[in-house]
Image (spheres, rainbow, N blue to C red):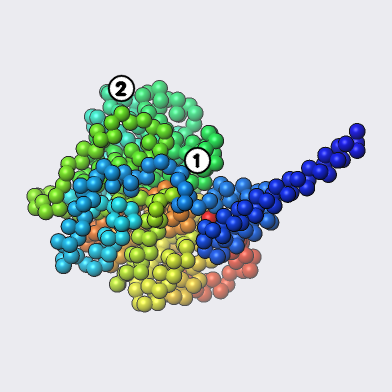
């Protein structure tokens, strides 16, 4: 009996090991064919062979190049082209007509956004900017209470706390009044924040609830590394909100961990609302949601760029990006803005783990005499990206980039302003996860008034920052440097 058991153990180990080698070889070929950055490819190949079974599983979950495949069936940028084709056809006409008046960098950015993300140029927009949660949720809840027809909400995190309960009461009341309410949450982001009881309450009240890549089913669990990081609310197809804030008490007062939560969010009226509606509908369908008539939601009035009627004039584009997008549109946008700056670049991001292109663009801009300022949080919520960011700071400081650590609370704002002419803000951090793994959405504004407003807010935030110097990094101990470098290696496993 013992001899038989020893035979099973003896023969089982080689078979398992052989399978591991075969799988690792196949995945090695896949990694080489993906043509990732050399250091990223080497990191993945080492992980395959140094961590038996775990390495291949981790690659299949987070390393597959989904640009060659499809995670979702309907991408928002494709929906723009399908249902808003007449507006798309006007883009080149608008650029040609305004070419002599527009700054050349603006024209290049408009072109790039259009061709990389089908980003329509909307002209008639009204925007209100929020830099804190209290006024944002006050106005959002007022708009929700006045909803008459539809409320569509999409959040990475929906938390079962006092703020989430207040939102639930509003949604339940509007459902009772006959308003159609759809709520989409990220399957992983809200896995531990929206309880089964909370979901049951919402559904019982009449809210249609879906999870994006639900980790409780096989496909969702396999795709758990690809999160929907977007934050969108569309009310009656007329008012929209987007930006960096989710639903949770911490967005009001910092929660239990931080004295304050500094963020950026937008309230929009005008033509761009129809585009945000289309992003929500695409994400809803990709999450298994049903729509009786898609055209019903595309009620944005046809617009003519030659229209000289009265109304707000704020040129804007909406940029979507995801792991299976044709182009990493927001990463391209960030690179383009930094590389084409003439005078200054102000950047806010809670996490800073850039790819080589963004890092080189920042160094080149600073070496060229551009005023480049980077602000990151000095009170981290996640240690690994915080430590990894420090490995980039020394070279940036040597190149002339000014780096500020925000210590007034947790800095969650994602923003770039260039030459007081172009502003982008939204859900996308300046890190490789946001660039290549998550589904993100940013607004881009082409307006000096908006640029000056964001620049002033950045300079006010500097008063609550500690500026870093290159001398500080010379004093960092070897153990901390090693820790930071190990964290940086993990950031390359894409």
Closer to us: 12 or 345: 12
Q: Residues within 10 Å of mark 2 (few under 14, many from 20)?
A: few
Residue at image point 65% right, 53% down = 24
Q: Identify the disc placed on residue 188.
A: 1
Where residue 235 sits: x, y (%)?
A: 27, 36
Q: From the image, which quarter does the N terminus lie in?
A: top right
Question: For numbered disc 2, what is the local secondary structure?
Answer: helix
Q: Secondary structure at mark 1?
A: loop
Choose the circle earlier in sequence order: 1 or 2: 2
Give the number of callouts.
Answer: 2
Q: Residue at x 9, y 53 (%)?
A: 308
Q: Position of residue 3 (x, y in %)?
A: 91, 38
- The residue at the far left in this view is 309
Note whether residue 409 is visible.
no
Residue in view at x 53 percent, y 55 percent: 494
Task: Inspect this view and state whether residue 334 appears.
Answer: yes
Residue 100 higher or lower than 197, as above or below: below
Q: Nearer the viewer, residue 489 or 95?
A: 95
Q: Which of labels 1 and 2 is toward the front?
A: 1
Q: Which residue is mark 2?
A: 176
Residues tagged 1 and 2 counted as in contact (Cβ below 8 A): no
Q: Residue furthest bottom?
A: 368
Q: Quadrant of residue 47?
A: bottom right
Residue 221, image x, y percentages: 54, 39
Residue in front for this viewpoint, 170 or 306: 306
Left or right: 58 in relation to 400: right
Query: Compared with residue 167, is residue 100 higher up or lower down, i.e. above or below?
Result: below
Q: Residues within 10 Å of mark 1 (few under 14, many from 20)?
A: many
Point out residue 66 in the picture as x, y percentages from the top left corner: 48, 50
Q: Nearer the viewer, residue 127 or 490?
A: 490
Mark 1 vs mark 2, CA separation in Å: 29 Å
């Amino acid at each position: 009996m013992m001899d038989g058991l020893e035979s099973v153990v003896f023969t089982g180990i080689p078979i398992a090991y052989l399978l591991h080698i075969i799988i690792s070889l196949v995945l090695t070929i896949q990694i080489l064919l993906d043509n990732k950055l050399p250091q990223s490819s080497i990191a993945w190949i080492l992980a395959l062979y140094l961590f038996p079974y775990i390495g291949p599983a981790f690659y299949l979950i987070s390393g597959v190049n989904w640009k060659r495949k499809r995670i979702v069936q309907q991408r928002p940028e494709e929906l723009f082209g399908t249902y808003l084709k007449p507006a798309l056809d006007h883009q080149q006409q608008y650029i040609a007509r305004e070419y002599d008046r527009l700054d050349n960098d603006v024209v290049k950015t408009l072109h790039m956004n259009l061709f990389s993300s089908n980003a329509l140029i909307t002209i008639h927009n009204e925007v209100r900017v929020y830099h804190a949660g209290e006024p944002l949720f006050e106005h959002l809840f007022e708009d929700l209470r006045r909803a008459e027809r539809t409320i569509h909400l999409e959040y990475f995190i929906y938390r079962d706390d006092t703020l989430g309960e207040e939102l639930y009461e509003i949604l339940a009341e509007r459902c009772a009044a006959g308003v159609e309410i759809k709520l989409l949450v990220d399957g992983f982001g809200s896995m531990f924040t929206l309880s089964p009881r909370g979901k049951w309450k919402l559904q019982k009240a009449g809210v249609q609830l879906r999870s994006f890549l639900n980790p409780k089913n096989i496909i969702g669990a396999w795709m758990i590394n690809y999160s929907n990081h977007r934050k969108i609310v569309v009310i009656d197809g007329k008012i929209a909100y987007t930006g960096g804030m989710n639903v949770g008490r911490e967005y009001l007062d910092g929660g239990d961990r931080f004295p304050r939560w500094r963020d950026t969010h937008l309230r929009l009226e005008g033509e761009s609302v129809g585009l945000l509606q289309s992003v929500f509908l695409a994400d809803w369908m990709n999450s298994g949601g049903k729509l009786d008539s898609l055209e019903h939601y595309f009620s944005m009035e046809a617009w003519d760029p030659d229209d000289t009627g009265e109304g707000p004039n704020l040129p804007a584009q909406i940029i979507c990006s995801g792991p299976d997008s044709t182009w990493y549109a927001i990463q391209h946008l960030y690179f383009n803005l930094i590389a084409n700056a003439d005078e200054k670049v102000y950047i806010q991001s809670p996490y800073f783990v850039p790819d080589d292109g963004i890092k080189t663009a920042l160094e080149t801009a600073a070496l060229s005499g551009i005023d480049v300022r980077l602000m990151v949080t000095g009170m981290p919520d996640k240690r690994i990206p915080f430590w990894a960011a420090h490995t980039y700071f020394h070279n940036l400081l040597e190149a002339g980039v000014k780096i500020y650590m925000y210590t007034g609370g947790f800095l969650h704002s994602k923003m770039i302003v260039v030459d007081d002419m172009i502003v982008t803000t939204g859900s996308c951090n300046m890190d490789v996860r946001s660039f290549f793994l998550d589904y993100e959405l940013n607004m881009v504004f082409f307006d000096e008034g908006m640029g000056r407003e964001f620049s002033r807010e950045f300079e006010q935030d500097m008063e609550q920052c500690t500026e870093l110097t290159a001398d500080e990094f010379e004093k960092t101990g070897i153990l901390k440097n090693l820790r930071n470098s190990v964290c940086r290696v993990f950031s390359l496993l894409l």
